[in-house]
Amino acid sequence: MNLQTGWKIWAGFAACLIGLAAPAVADEPAGLKLLRPDSLSGWDYAAQPPAHWVISQGQLTGTADSTPLLSGFTVDEFELRFEWSTTPGGAWRLSLPDVPTGAGLSIAIKEGEGSGAIRDGERTLAPGKSVEALASPAVHTAQIRRFGQTLAVIVDGRLVSEVELDPNRRFGLALSVPEGEATLREFRLQEPRGNPLNNGRDFTGWFVNNSKGTWAVDNGDFIPTSHTGLHYLRTDKEYANFTLSLEYTISRGGNSGLAIRTAKDGWPSGDGMELQILDRPGEVKDSTMAIYGNLPPLDRADRSEAWNQVVVKADGSIISVWVNGELVQHANTARLSELKHRHLKGWIGLQDHGGKVRFRKVYVHEAPDGLGLDEWYQPRSESGAGLVLDRVMNSEQLSRVDGLGSGLTTAAVPKGGEHVLAELTGPGALVSCWSTFPSGQLSIYFDGESEPRIRCATEHLADHVPAVAHETAPALFCLPFAKSLKVVVNDSLEANYRLEHVTFPAGVPCESFSERRPGVPRGMLAAITYRHQGTSGGKLREAEIHSRVASQPRTIEPGTTVELAKLDGAGLVNWLRLTADEAVLKSDDLWLEVTVDGESLPSIAAPARFIYPGFARPAARDFSSLVLTRKDGVASLLSMPFGAGLTVAARNRGDKPIENVAVSMSVEQATDKNRADLAGRMRLCGIYQPAGSAGTELVRQAGSGRWVGFVYQQADETETGIAALEVDGTARDGWAMRELDAFFGRPGEGENFFTALAGRQGELSWRYLLLAPVTFEQSLVVKANDGDKVGGRLALFYLKK
């Protein structure tokens, strides 16, 4: 190909690039910015975390000591443009690793000989040319273009290398500084727009789940016309990996959204992903281009009542979004507690949420199926706060042997004065605070500092810490501290306090809380809140990626046991749902028995109402929980790993037949990658004891594991308390209590209540210790007070087998 012919082809290619045709705002530079102004979001996928880089106002500076940067983007045809400079002898190396794995190409960008040199692995494809040094502060420009078989490098407007490549190769994008010091800015990407999804005339290729009549084509734009209800204009075709581009404008205060990767019968915010469009001032968790309910945007770049250009790249588990050229969202959903359960292929949709919205210039550039670069998914050290919070979203994390421990500090505070409630040594996290009567002022000191980072009224603690599900009684949160934590109360009324914390082993990353950097993973608290809203409303992941196993309804005759479901091999049960007449939850007649790994005795054998407490009518309609939910039956979200099969059976211990009993499960079958991991997990076990059994012991368990749940039936209006909690034969401080109300989290006279991890309904009370389970290596014993009448109870554990 001669140079003149090449430039003609490039001119035609440029006309099709995203951002070059009719930019959203006049005079705005075309292309997508690949660097955030002051962070390396999207560039932290290399084996080593980014180090020795400086980024300020979008300008990136590195040295030979800087770690390589690997982006979360892949490309096929593209143009990269940037401005660059180096110190004498310095250089940039721009790498294009092959997808999914392989060294790929490397391009030298430097002054002097060899600028633009292209290597493919160890083979030199083009030697490059000499680039004249410029006097500071002048900067060079560079363009790297790949179209079809041709890759060209242009420095300061001059073609310095051009090679032919296999047109089927797809590349990632990486940066490094092999020598000296180098600076880069205005780093922009352009890609082909691809195929139009709106033809300007009709809805060919689109449908609405109720009626197309609620949308119209107006001057070539898609507009909703009913402005009532909530629905999507959806593509007939499903898309996996793609770059989607469009423009929208919406009325002031309007609400809309973009749906991606949603299963055929799913709903984007719960089963796929909804990228929020919200024309409201300020930055909130669901600002424009938030992944609705799960991940706030990095920033805002949308303009009110104006045309906005949006580009979405979906590549494996990576989602990136630009608004008006600015990178405002980036996430590896494989590492996000909720979104990792979503499909990687589905329909694209435009939302009608009542706002006056218009969509135009909708294009999609499809990419091959796959997960992108293998390196994106290499194991990483998770933060301690992330490990703790992930337990709430995915209880299977509790079955891992991770070295996290827990502790409890109690204090009886007289009226007035200053009192230290807790002094803790890190690394760790404070996760709950309960008091018989919230009053006075709390001050929380971190890492030996003389001034508190948090000072607030005790009753408003949840408003000043990273709160879990907005719970206040007790306050649930995750407050990480690297070295130490001290909690002080001033001017309190007489009260008892219970503060629970988690300890992190050496090597687990932990950053102390601060107002600007709370030390918890971005979006996790929002995801927990959204999950809590869903489970409290009866929702499960209805269109998740995992398989479903469901039994046929059976009649269980008195005195018989019927196997309802059986799983072979290894895997993980994410939730177990029981379908039966709700009357079975009002007595102990129906029992469920779960047997794992072919053992002779069930791991769980208990009355169904103890496994699903709190669902007896009428109070169940007000239910609130992160562990239990009700829809088409009742479900428990305590995960059950198994290595050699799992069976669920029902037993009738009453004197009448029980009809229409069935179970269903969400099952993640083991793969070659995680089979060994699942084999080493602890197994969920449930120990049920009827009222009056085991003397004054509430709980006894031998072996090694974690205590994660307790359901209790109060006996005959009497009080039951705790005399001691013994772990491995040693009594733990702070566990003695006259009555169990403090353990369940609400003082009072037995009134009903429901919270994310605890509750009481009638004679049953329950609590799930997901944030701070009690870990033991040899034994765990919970003793009731002498003379207490002990009721029926179910203790739940993850145990090493």
Image (cartoon, rainbow, N blue to C red):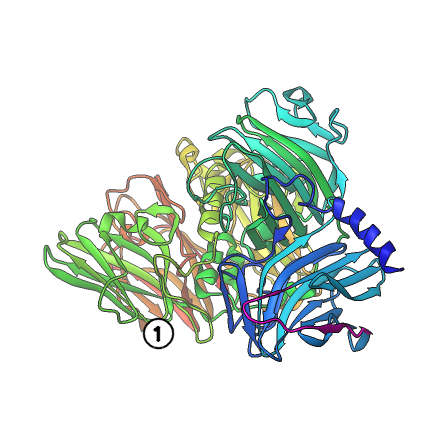
Please provide the residue range marked out in magenta.
125-140
In which quadrant is the N terminus drawn?
Answer: bottom right
Q: Reply above or below: 250 against 366.
A: above
The magenta stretch spans residue 60: no
Q: Quadrant of the C terminus?
A: bottom right
Task: Identify which residue, 439 or 754, lies in the foreground.
Answer: 439
Counting from the top left corner in percent of width and height, residue 198 is at 73, 32
Does any portion of residue 648 appear in the rendered image?
Answer: no
Q: Amino acid at mark 1?
A: Gly
Q: Give the secondary structure at mark 1.
A: loop
Q: Is residue 128 magenta?
A: yes
- Numbered marks: total: 1
Q: Position of residue 135 (x, y in %)?
A: 58, 72
Q: Relative to residue 782, is residue 315 drawn left or right? A: right
Q: Is residue 205 visible?
A: yes
Residue for badge 1: 729
Residue 216 placement (x, y as % from top left): 67, 22
